[in-house]
Amino acid sequence: MASFCLTKSRSFIIQTLKSNKTSTNRTSYIHNNVSSSPLPVSEHAYYSHKNVSIVFNHSFKSIYVSRRLHSTTSVDELPAEAPLQQVLDFPGGKVKFTPKLTFASGATKERVHCYRVLDDNGQMLTDSDSLGINKELAVKLYTNMLTLEVMDTIFYEAQRQGRISFYATTTGEEAINIASAAALNNNDFVFPQYREPGVLLWRGFSLQEFAHQLFGNKYDYGKGRQMPIHYGSKKLNYITVASTVATQIPHAVGAAYSLKMEKQDSCSITYFGDGGTSECKPQGDFHGAMNFAAVMEVPVIFFCRNNGWAISDGVAVKGKAYGVPSIRVDGNDALAIYNAVSEARKMAITEQTPVLIEALTYRAGHHTTSDDSTRYRPVEEIQRWRDDQNPVKRFRKWIESKGWWTDEAESQHYSSIRKQLAQAIQVAERIEKPPVADMFNDVYDVPPKNLTAQEALLRKTVKKHVQDFPSDVPL
């Protein structure tokens, strides 16, 4: 699913990388999804001169300039601007961290700083009371992130067992999913890409509903006509996922314009990857949407998951180019995401303005079950991000430090979710598929003759060659 046009030759890219003086300090980087099981070591797992399929000198490496940021540093000692103790060596240059929540719409001398609240060890960098995160909300955030993590593991394994045809995980992006959802209201409209099931989970989509969609049975809201993971829920204002890159972005702007005209106390939010901001389709969905949103001043949140892979030096600057208030956030910091989205939603509705959030993150797994990301990135890099930069582990360290979570609670929740998922899968795969008629309805009020003829031909073919068709599809 390439989301951008690669116009430079491979040789040119490699030559450029070799001339980069800082390349030796960076790790190659891409955002892909993987199961929780150990990754297979392949002969293609490491870059070499003989095996360079795509190399963009991607990196997302924390550089510790000083250790003063840990427990020895009080909140009062923190500088008002970006702390210089840690920077992110991201494609295009180093990005400084800052504990200051700032949405900018104009040019700045420095590269846009990255807002974070928790450091890599789960230590607070700002006053926690100002965030309004109590025990109940914190525990709900964590349990939902853990549920999403377990759900991905079980469904990924189900695909590997041949029980479902396709799956894509959110490994490494649990904080983006859950924390952003927590900052929204259920009357806000969500226009997802294909890696935001956590938003549905937070809004109350059950594990059984997820299973029904993945198995495409008669209880699937899409009537089995969508690929697995292409969820949708009218009740929860979650617009059905489409695989086509960036098409959901202008849709979200249109919905926001409608909310504005109707004077609704709500906004729309759309999720997309950094490649979606550079996609080369003639209509230029991202830029067209940004321009319309800025001109018409509509309440929409553009949420970009930037993994640095799609030849994108940054997305926040693209929002600023349209005069849209923009912020860069640590995508592995649940508290930073929650605070940023909360403020963005408030701005979007009260000021009637679009807002852009760029979350720097890392998809610590294969792109989908059809991908083997070890062919273009080192296994060690993946494992480092799954261990050292895991957003779920980081948030757990914080709630444990507050006395809000224990190993016993972890074990109980983990066991409960696994049992629920096992049952949901068993139920979903026993239910028959949607009837043949559902392939042809919901488009025309009165089906045209050619469509009616196609349906009749299909029924005739199934009856004639019954052995070649699934037995659980009602005619």
Image (spheres, helix red, strand yellow):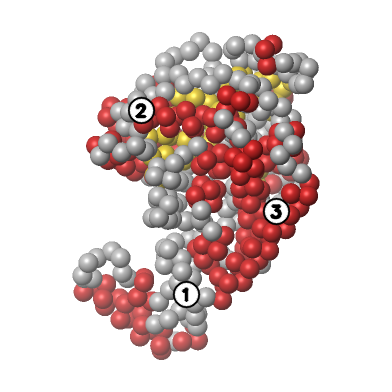
Q: Nearer the viewer, residue 373 or 16?
A: 373
Classify mark 3: helix, strand or loop. Answer: helix
Label 2 sits on what residue type?
A: Thr
Classify mark 2: helix, strand or loop. Answer: helix
Query: From what the image shows, is residue 35 above or below residue 362?
Result: below
Residues at badges 2 and 3 in contact (C-beta under 8 Å)? no
User: Residue placed at 27% from the left, 29% from the top?
Assistant: 296
- Mark 3 Cα shell of 10 Å, populated few (<14), some (14-19), many (≥20): some
User: Residue placed at 44% from the left, 14% from the top?
Assistant: 107
Q: Nearer the viewer, residue 283 or 199?
A: 199
The label number, if any, that marks residue 413 in the structure image: 3
Query: From what the image shows, is residue 214 above or below residue 303?
Result: below
> Where is residue 369 shown, x and y percent of the image?
61, 56
- Figure label count: 3
Q: Closer to the camera: disc 1 or disc 3?
A: 3
Q: Quadrant of residue 329?
A: top right
Q: Closer to the N terminus: mark 2 or mark 1?
A: 2
Examine the rendering and report whether any part of residue 205 can be seen: yes
> Where is residue 327 shown, x and y percent of the image?
49, 24
Classify mark 1: helix, strand or loop. Answer: loop
Left/right placement of residue 305 relative to residue 20 reads left
Query: From what the image shows, is residue 365 above or below residue 24?
Result: below
Which residue in the structure is indicated by mark 2?
350
Distance of label 1 from label 3 (alpha carbons): 32 Å
Label 1 sits on what residue type?
A: Lys
Distance of label 2 from label 3 (alpha carbons): 38 Å
Which residue in the structure is indicated by mark 1?
433
User: Residue placed at 69% from the left, 47% from the top?
Assistant: 374
Q: Quadrant of the C terminus?
A: bottom left
